[in-house]
Amino acid sequence: MTQTTQATGHLDPDLLNAFIDGELSPTESNGIQQHLADCHPCALRVLSATQLKTATARAARRFAAPPEALARLAAQLRPQESKRTARSYSFRSVAWAGLAAALVLALSLGGWWQAHQANTLSAELLDQHLATLSSGASPEVLSTDRHTVKPWFQGKLPFSFNLPDVLPADTTLKGGNLAYLNGQPAALLLFTIHKHEVSVFLTQRSGSPIATPLPGTRSGFSIHSATTHDLRIVAVSDVNPADLDLLVSAIEQTQSPR
Amino acid sequence: MSSDTTSASFEQLALPLLPSLYSHAFWLCRNHAEAEDLVQETLSKALRAFDSFQTGTNFKAWVFRILRNTFLTSRTGIAASRTVFLEDHPDLLGTTDAGPTPEDHLISLNNQAAVNQALDQLHPPLREVLLLCDVEELKYKDIALVLDVPIGTVMSRISRARRTLHQLLQPQRGESL
C-alpha cells in the first residue's frame, strides 16, 4: 500500500474522498483502515468528511419537487396511454383518473421520502458508531459510574435523562460523549454487552416531531429505538438483538419515575 | 422492440428517477417552473434517444447526462456557462494539516443552516459534482459520463468542492454553540 499515504504520512485528500465514497477496492480499503487504526488525525478527518457528506446530502434535499409537478411529469411519461384514454372516455372520468393517479403518486412519494429519511438517519447512526469504534479515542467522560457520567452532560445538553440503577447482565457503562444527530445535540452513551460495543444516542423528542421508523438492521448492525415522553433512544451495536433490546428497555424504563 | 414496449420500459426506468431529476434540475436552474420544463424536455429527448441507451449500463447516469446537456443549451444554461469556470489544475497546496482541527468541523456541521448556506455559495460546477456524488450517489465513472470529463477531473473537483465547503463553514465556528 505505497499509495495510501502521501509524503506527510497522512492520507492523500483524493484517496480519503475515494474511501468515503466507496470507490476503492477491498484491498485498498483495508490498507486505509489499517492506517486509520493507527492514525488518529486521519481517523478524525474521515469522520468529519463523512459527516460533511451527510450534511451536504441533507442540505441538497431541501428542494423537493412539488407533488403537482411530479404528477404532470409522470403523466408525460405515458403519452400513448393518455391519448387512447382521452378518445374512449369522457373528460370527467379522465379527470378523476388523473386525480387518483396524482394521489397515488403523492402517497408513494411520501413513503419514498420517509424511507429515504430513515435511511439517511440510520447511515448517520452507523457512521457515528463506527467512528467511535475506529478512532480508538477514549470517551470524553470515561467512567463506569452513572453518577459521574450523567452530571458530565449537565450544561452541555438542553435536556436531561436518567441512567438505570441496575444494568442487564454483563452490560457495562464505559462512558459518554456529545454527538450530533440530524443536526440535534445528542448524548452518546457507550456500553459494552458481552464485550460488544454499543452506542446509545439520546435526543430530545420535541426537536424531531416526526419519529421516522428506523430499519432494524444496517450492514449487519442492529439498530433499536424507543421513545419516552421527552426522549428518543436509539442503540446501535453488533451484539445480538435480544440483549440490545434489554438495554434499550432498561434505559427507557428509568426515564419515567415509578 | 415495438414502440409500445419501448415506452413501457422507458417509463419503468424513468418514473422512479423523477424526484431526483427534478431536484437536480432545480439546483441547475434555481427556479421551479424552469426545473419542470427542463425535466419535461429531458424526458422527451431521452425517450426519443432511448434506442441508443445500452442495456446494462447505468440508466440514471445516461438520463442525467441528457438533463445536463439540455440545461447547457437552455437560456439559463448558456448564461451560466459564461461565468468563469475554474480550471481543473491539481492542487499544489498541502491541505492535510493546515487549518483547524477536524473536531471544529464536527461542531460547525451541527448547524444545518450554515451547511445550506455554504452549499448555496459553492461555485456551481463544484456543487454539481458534489450533488451527483453525495445526493444522487453516482459512482465516479458515472459522474465522469454525466459531466463528460475524465475520472481524474471528477476526483479533483470532489476534493476541491469538499475543501471549499470546509472553508466556507469555518467562520461559523463557535456561533452554533
Image (cartoon, rainbow, N blue to C red):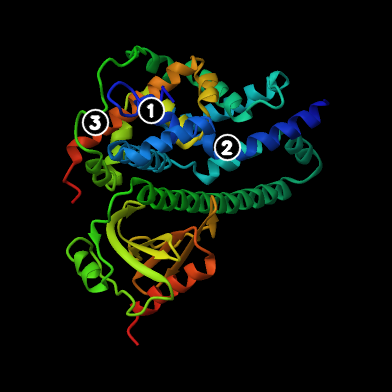
Q: Quadrant of the N terminus of chain B?
A: top right
Would residue B74 be visible to someone looking at this image? Answer: no
Residue visible at 64% across and 24% down in the picture: B46
Q: Which residue lies furthest to the bottom in this view?
A: A258
Residue matched to label 2: B18
User: What's the residue type where badge 2 is placed?
Assistant: Leu
Residue visible at 40% across and 64% down in the picture: A192
Checking the image for residue B127, the label placed there is 1
Describe the element under mark 3 as helix, strand or loop: helix
Q: Which of A95 and A40 lies nearest the eye of the viewer?
A: A40
Would residue A16 be visible to someone looking at this image? Answer: yes
User: What's the residue type where badge 3 is placed?
Assistant: Gln
Q: Is there CB contact under 8 Å for labels 3 and 2? A: no
Q: Name which of mark 1 and mark 2 comes first in the sequence.
A: 2
Residue matched to label 3: B167
| Neighbours of disc 3 within 10 Å: few (<14), some (14-19), many (20+) | some
The residues tagged by marks 1 and 2 sit, at their Cα atoms, a distance apart of 20 Å
Residue visible at 36% across and 52% down in the picture: A182
Nearer the observer: mark 3 or 2; the answer is: 3
Question: Mark 3, chain letter?
Answer: B
Quadrant assignment, res A44 = top left
Nearer the observer: mark 3 or 1; the answer is: 3
Question: Mark 1, chain letter?
Answer: B
User: What's the residue type where badge 1 is placed?
Assistant: Arg
Q: Name which of mark 3 and mark 1 comes first in the sequence.
A: 1
Q: Which of A94 and B129 lies nearest the eye of the viewer?
A: B129
Vertical position of residue A93 compared to residue B56: above or below: below
Residue A257 % position (x, y): 32, 84
User: Are tags 3 and 2 found on a single chain?
Assistant: yes
Residue B153 % position (x, y): 43, 17
